[in-house]
Amino acid sequence: MSHIYLDYNASTPVNEKVAEVMRTFLEKPFGTPSSKHWAGASAKDILENARQQVAELLGAKAEEIVFTSGGSEANNQALKGTFFALKGKGDHVISQVTEHPAILEPLRFLERLGAKVTYLPVDRYGLVDPDAVRRAITPRTVLITVMHANNETGTIQPIETIGAIAREHGIRFHSDAAQSIGKIPVRVDRLGVDLLSITGHKLYAPKGIGVLYVRTGTALEPLIHGAGHEYGMRAGTESAMLAAALGEASSLASDLGPVENIRSLRDYFWKELRSLYGDRITLNGHSSRLPNTLNVSFLGQVGAEVLERLEGVAASTGSHADRTEPSPVLLNMGLTEDAGMGAVRFSLGRETTRLEIELVMDQFRSKPFSK
């Protein structure tokens, strides 16, 4: 039985070039980047080179790149750091209902501390209305946070338009770009963000490393207090190895050429599924979505059971592979409970082949649904 990985939105394999960069750190350099002696100097140089590589991918300045342990920490730092830094100016935050739990849970925590959060609805494609963002703004609004692309459906939000609204009103704007980075262009000035989160393991780098982009002049209360690492934004000795890995992955991600092949495979996969199941299968999300993401509902079926029938195929029913209830993201888009229960997310990557898609389709054809 062959193993076929179609869950790249959950995590990506470490690219071989990235792994090779990491191997060089197992013995040297072993100093801490903040040390002034020879053992730390080389680690510092490597850390700063990685920072520059990430900055180039985002169109940012190197000093605007803050390394974190991953996307969840970056999101927490952006939201909590803003709330505490600007609490004298206001306590209102605007977000939307299909955000990742790494946004929703910190917001709920801040609500317990007195924050007022507006969760905007989305339409049937998962899009938030920029005019709704504008209408939600109050004199107490200090932050708008809207994800760049949804992890389940791939729907790409109108970040540039929302960013313009935020600038017009002088409100800080954050976006979780964990899913979009390396799949579509992510340039901070074009998006109009003040804060942007990315995570390494969605970008063919290892788990345990991420970045929070912090636009120059954006005041944040640190999430982790201690010594003055990362420009005073994040205490803790940096891992030059993990930073270098993310730096190399960022350099590789700057070439979006392979993405067109992924899009072609994704579209072929959908065409074959549609041909096989007709009106018993529906597509979830907007036509403007990530080129690798295919979220479909097998009507009358349970998504988890569909996946169980696919031997050796790694995919998921949403942001959690073991989901046994309808996805809140899909329900918030107005899907029925039946359609939500039948949802499966296939997410392709740079290593996905046409043969793998054919093998998956062979399984679908050989195992017809019983009803």
Image (cartoon, rainbow, N blue to C red):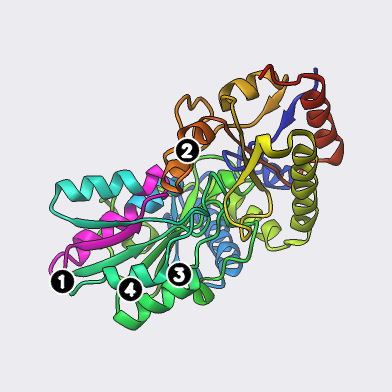
Q: Nearer the viewer, mark 1 or mark 4?
A: 4
Residue tagged by mark 1?
Answer: 89
Can you tell which quarter of the image residue 185 is in?
bottom right
- 138 lies above or below 18: below
Which dot, 3 or 2, sits closer to the camera? 2
Residue position for label 3 = 63
Q: Quadrant of residue 116?
A: bottom left
Residue 29 seen anywhere in this rendered image of the structure: no
* Residue on which disc 4 sits: 134
| Magenta-tinted stretch | 77-103
Between disc 3 and disc 2, whose residue precedes? 3
Amino acid at circle 3: Glu
Q: Which of pointers 1 and 3 lies earlier in the amino acid sequence?
A: 3
Q: Which mark is residue 336?
A: 2
Q: Say which of marks 1 and 2 sits in front.
A: 2
Q: CA distance from mark 2 to mark 4?
A: 29 Å
Q: Amino acid at mark 1?
A: Lys
Residue at 55% x, 51% y is 179
The image quarter containing residue 131 is bottom left
Where residue 307 appears, x then y in whole percent? Answer: 64, 24
